[in-house]
Image: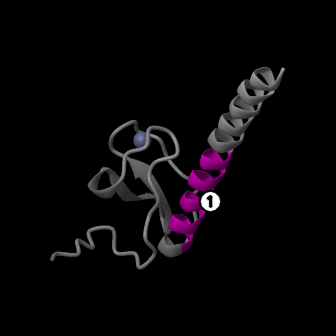
Amino acid sequence: MSTQVSTQVSEPMMACPFCGADGEDLVMLEIDAAQYAVTCDCCAGIGPSDALRDRAVMLWNGSALRALGRTRRAFERAVTVVQGEGAR
Ligand SMILES: [Zn+2]
């Protein structure tokens, strides 16, 4: 069991909200002096930046959660439509 801490953060990162990549594709980037942001090697998507790495991860996770919520809502809407049609 190996825990790679190349990103040097304690917060676990959620999968990329843009392309779904996770693990080693997610990289902590120092975009400016003491400004960090999580970026995705896969699609070059970048999360919100923060002076703290852990907070940059939390912001990234927030974006991922919101993206997930959008997907789920769209999915639930689709399911509702299908069920509504079936009931008629
Ligand atoms: Zn990505």
- Residue at (62, 45) in percent of width and height: 67
What percent of the width, then of the height, locates residue 78? 70, 29
In this rendering, position of residue 6 left or right of residue 53: left
Given the image, on which type of amino acid does mark 1 rest? Gly
Q: Quadrant of the N terminus?
A: bottom left
- Residue at (16, 75) in percent of width and height: 2
Instruction: Say if 49 sits above or below 70 in the image.
Output: below
Q: Looking at the image, which residue sits at the far right?
A: 88
Q: Looking at the image, which residue sits at the far left?
A: 1
Instruction: Say if 37 sits above or below 88 in the image.
Output: below
Q: Which residues are magenta?
A: 55-69
Q: Quadrant of the C terminus?
A: top right
Q: Quick one: 13 or 55, which is closer to the camera?
A: 13
Name the secondary structure under disc 1.
helix
- What residue does disc 1 label? 62
What percent of the width, then of the height, locates residue 29? 40, 57
What percent of the width, then of the height, locates residue 79? 69, 33
